[in-house]
Image: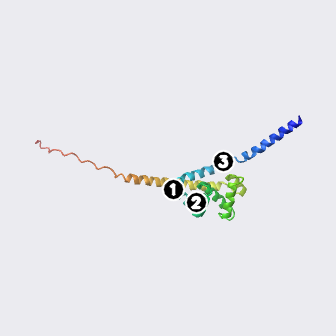
Amino acid sequence: MKNNKLQLMLAGLFLCAAAMPALAQEKTREEKKLESSAVELDKNAAKPEGQVRVSDKIKAEFGVDDARIQSLRDKNMGYGGISIALGLAQGLPGGITDANVNKVMAMRQGPPVMGWGKIAKELGLKLGPVRSKVRKMSAEVKKANKAEGRKGMKRMKGDRGGKPEKMGRPETRGKSGSR
């Protein structure tokens, strides 16, 4: 009987140990908001002109070049993920260096694969400032995309040729009464 109880206790411990990583992987509210902003940034880059705007915004915000962005894109990262990785690397001593970016990417890609919140915690950083930057960038690109869309609509309206000319009144016979 004692043996059965011991086996049940051990089985329970193993189940708890197996469930712990799943609980540890739960995302914080801050991390969910950050990822939501990153997805929005990726949506804004869906069209080629949007990609240019997002890429330009990343270059301006983080002071990186096209080669840095392309190297991260080659690792199957979206623009939102690139912005998060660069934002975290920027918070490390030395800022955005190859070593810091590689450190963040190694933690993200694993093993073990870590979420952005866990990476920030491991690096002694907070997600709030990164989230603010990503959200701001996304809003600015979205605004620029809308403005470009309105310009395109105005151009299309201008191509229609404008209003048709008014037709003149039909000629009337004189009022003299002669017919």
Image quadrant where residue 72 sits: bottom right
Which residue is denoted by mark 2 in the rendering? 58
Which residue is denoted by mark 1 in the rendering? 48
Picture layout, residue 108 above or below residue 66: above
Residue type marked 2:
Ile
Q: Residue 168: percent from the left, percent from the top? A: 24, 48
Mark 1–mark 2 contact, CB under 8 Å? no
- Locate the N terminus by quadrant: top right
Picture layout, residue 18 above or below residue 100: above
Instruction: Identify the disc placed on residue 29.
Output: 3
Query: Seen in the image, is 94 located left or right of residue 5?
Result: left
Between label 3 and label 1, give the one nearer the viewer: 1
| Mark closest to the chain's N terminus, 2 or 3 | 3
Between label 1 and label 2, give the one nearer the viewer: 1
Residue type marked 1:
Pro
Q: Is residue 114 or residue 168 the one in the foreground?
A: 114
| Mark closest to the chain's N terminus, 3 or 1 | 3
